[in-house]
Image (cartoon, grey):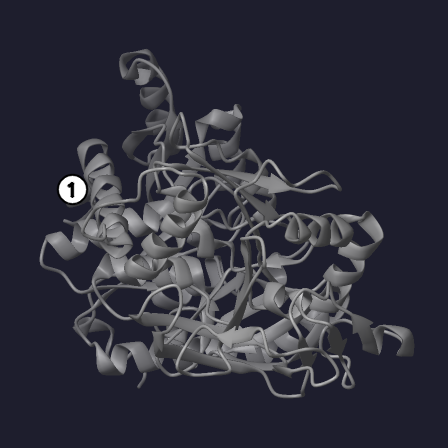
Amino acid sequence: MDLEVKSHERRKPIMVLGTSSGAGKSLTVTAICRILKNLGEEPIPFKGQNMSNNAWVDWEGGEMAYSQALQAFACGINPSAEMNPILLKPQGNSTSEVIHLGKSIGTTTAQNYYKDWFVPGWKVIEKSLNSIYKRNPHCRLIIEGAGSPVEMNLIHRDLTNLRVAKYLNANCILVTDIERGGVFAQIIGTLELMKPEEKKLIKGIIINRYRGDFSLFEEGKKWIESKTKIPVLGIIPWLNDSFPPEDSLDLIEKKPLFSDPEIKVGIIKLPSISNFSDFDPLENEKSLLIEWIRESQNLRKYDFIILPGSKQTIKDQIYLENSGLSQDIREYANSNGNIVGICGGLQMLGTVLEDPYSKEGSKNYSEQKTKGIGLLPLKTTFLEKKITRQINSQSLWPCQAKINGFEIHNGQTKLDITQKTFDIKPIFKDLDLGWYKENNGGGTIAGTYIHGIFENDSWRDKYINLIRKSKNLPLLNRESISYKKKRESIINNLANEFDKHLNLKLFLS
């Protein structure tokens, strides 16, 4: 489909650009998607290129950034890898895995990326846009930029900001974060660095994360509009959102949502942590306090600990061993602690990790066969082909329930026949999705390949009740509070807050 020929059939795309990384583009797109859905439109999110290890798997088995999946939920549609045709997954040493249209197609260094991947990258963006419009000719694309659109050392090879805006002739909104300070310089500097034909695409400005009395910024708003000749569409107050940040380092700064927790959860902060949105359902549990563990310590203060997913399982396992955390985890298990490993965390809980094809970052022979923590009699071999798929299964422990989630992993895990395996049991009817072992004196060691396991309400409730029972706390006695309904409520609240302060209808007209 020729976008130029058929452009009269399309609703004008909206693109959200930012004066910097972290200005609030992702949540702004999420809010606009829900606002437009509520207005009866057919919004579809799009981000040409994203860099993140927080991924989602669509119903075709394609990988995409979780932020675009969340935006699709805000539109009331199923996520598709076409909404994020290029995903770069960092794996250390300035290298990244390259994913096009949901499929892993290679690795690249930062130095060689634009030389080797710019042309095929733009082709896959064009292909995705054509495909979306072919299936949804009356949709309105809500496009998210990346970082700043005027990084002058990179702008000649821009794949996902102004190049997309000009290609689609999108109406662009510039979002700036007043919390960072220097908001006037952010706006004027960004616009001054644009070419005249690029600046013409900026149809509105949003001041994000404003604290205090709005009337105190009225003169500032007038100055911006007078100086730029671009309307300020809205001033968005500071919102206490609970969405996962794109950068996993931000997790350290997340504040507890609830006071007076009854259960303390420790999550190991792996250097190459991935899929940290797995823990959003726990963040929304009033009885839980989550803390991130980055250094060796006595773990007995935690009621359960989680080993999360990893982009480089072997390197992260070596880190755990060298830092002393592996020994801390073993001692915690021996004191009847409760442990859950997810994906890479499951693999690390086993006895052996083998990487014959160097798929998990092993660079030499000594790293190609590495000891795990050794709490579950499992052996993992990393194969050449990655597994990415949606999961529908049935749990056997800690309750019988329908289970939904997804897999993203390299590696095949089997029982290690050199170890005692009589006390390890499957968690699911699909026997290769997870295992658990009960300690003699209490506590369980469990590991699963299923991302999103805690989104399954009955499973999450039952697991938390196991912990509560061990602490002689009253059991949760409730109809399961659906996390997905909570997520819908959060998106609705986000959209309502934006709608109060954002003159989007004027912008659309």
- Residue at horizontal 51%, vertical 54%? 276
In the rendered structure, the answer to whether residue 30 lies left or right of residue 278 reads left
* Residue 3 is at least partly visible in this image: no
- The residue located at (47%, 58%) in the rendering is 162
Q: Nearer the viewer, residue 355 or 70?
A: 355
Residue 399 at x, y = what percent? 33, 65
Whether residue 89 is visible here, answered yes or no, is: yes
Determine the image quadrant of residue 237: top left
Q: Is residue 6 left or right of residue 197?
A: left
Judging depth in this view, the residue of 310 and 398 nearest the camera is: 398
Quarter placement of the N terminus: bottom left
Question: Residue at 63% of width from left, 81% of height from top?
Answer: 411
Which of the two residues, 323 or 29, is positioned nearer the viewer here? 323
Residue 500: quadrant of the picture: top left
- Extreme-front residue of the structure: 441
Check disc 1 and give the amino acid type: Leu
**Number of dots carrying numbers:** 1
**Tag 1's secondary structure?**
helix
Other-residue count near label 1 (Cα within 10 Å), few / some / many at <14 / 14–19 / ≥20: few
Q: Relative to 432, does residue 462 appear above or below in the rendering?
A: above
Residue linked to disc 1: 506
Residue 194 position in % (x across, y down): 51, 47
Image quadrant in which you'd find residue 404 = bottom left
Residue 459 location, x and y as percent? Answer: 34, 61
Relative to 49, say whether 322 is above or below.
Answer: above
